[in-house]
Image (cartoon, rainbow, N blue to C red):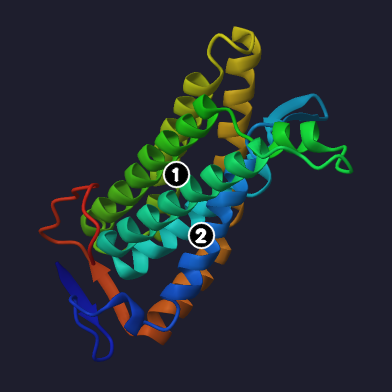
């Protein structure tokens, strides 16, 4: 794995030695957990039907792009795994608490259970879709960075999102809601959510440029993943 060094950093540098990776990981993980909780609500604005996760989940792909572009696939993969572990843990805790017998004075248990006691099928669908989509997004951006020699950042952030969000969105909706929602509503909602997520990526492209440039200058690193095997199931740096 090749690194274009602007300071004294090396490819083997520990994640904790970078100044901003902890912050990015924390925000990315928070977005992942909140998206899992809000994904079960279907809402409509101006006749457009979307899932509740549309409010925040597109930001996860922007952070994924930033991580891969600056720090490389391995660190991005590590953060994706951290987000997955935390999301599974949060869902398990929500489910246990929702199943606990309510006190006689607590009259909102059914509402609490419906919101936070996620149906296992929906939770598992969300985890699988997240993993497939985020990993695909990271791999494509990494490969395109090498192919474009680091030029045209906008092309790889948008292209990787087009593929990653496509896999994520349709995998989630069809794994979670097939046979539950009418087929036309399922397809309509999935398409709307996909277009929304890609649209957010496009709109935020100038911000992505600013953040990427800032991190590369401050961290003194710009990773090119030459020789990377792109194994999604490893958990190292």
Q: Residue 133 lies in what quarter of the image?
A: top left
Q: Quadrant of the C terminus?
A: bottom left
Numbered tag placed on residue 194 in the rendering: none
Residue positioned 31% across, 56% down in the render = 77
Position of 103 compared to 177: left or right? right
Position of 120 compared to 99: left or right? left
Residue positioned 58% across, 25% down in the render = 191
Q: Quadrant of the N terminus?
A: bottom left
Residue denoted by label 1 = 161
Q: Position of residue 20 (x, y in %)?
A: 45, 78
- The number of numbered discs placed on residues in the rendered structure image is 2
Label 2: how many Cα within 10 Å (few below 14, some 14–19, many 20+): many
Of tags 1 and 2, which is closer to the observer? 2
Q: Position of residue 62 (x, y in %)?
A: 50, 56
Q: Secondary structure at mark 2?
A: helix
Residue denoted by label 2 = 28
Q: Position of residue 140 (x, y in %)?
A: 30, 47
Q: Residue furthest bottom?
A: 8
Q: Nearer the viewer, residue 114 or 146?
A: 114
Residue positioned 27% across, 52% down in the render = 144
Q: Secondary structure at mark 1?
A: helix
């Amino acid at each position: 794995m090749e690194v274009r060094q602007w300071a004294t950093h090396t490819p083997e540098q520990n994640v904790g030695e970078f100044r901003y990776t902890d912050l990015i990981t924390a925000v990315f993980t928070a977005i992942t957990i909140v998206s899992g909780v809000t994904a079960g609500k279907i809402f409509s604005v101006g006749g457009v039907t979307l899932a509740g996760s549309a409010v925040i989940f597109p930001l996860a792909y922007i952070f994924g792009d930033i991580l891969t572009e600056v720090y490389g696939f391995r660190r991005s993969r590590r953060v994706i795994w951290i987000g997955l572990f935390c999301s599974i843990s949060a869902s398990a805790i929500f489910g246990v608490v929702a199943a606990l017998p309510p006190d006689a004075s607590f009259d909102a248990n059914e509402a609490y259970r419906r919101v936070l006691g996620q149906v296992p099928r929906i939770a598992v669908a969300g985890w699988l879709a997240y993993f497939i989509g985020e990993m695909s997004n990271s791999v494509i951006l990494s490969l395109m960075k090498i192919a474009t020699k680091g030029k045209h950042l906008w092309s790889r952030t948008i292209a990787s999102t087009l593929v990653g969000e496509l896999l994520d969105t349709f995998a989630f909706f069809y794994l979670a809601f097939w046979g539950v929602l009418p087929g036309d509503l399922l397809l309509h909602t999935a398409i709307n959510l996909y277009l929304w997520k890609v649209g957010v990526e496009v709109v935020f492209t100038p911000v992505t440029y600013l953040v990427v440039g800032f991190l590369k200058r401050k961290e003194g690193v710009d990773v090119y993943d030459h020789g990377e095997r792109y194994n999604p199931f490893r958990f190292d740096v």
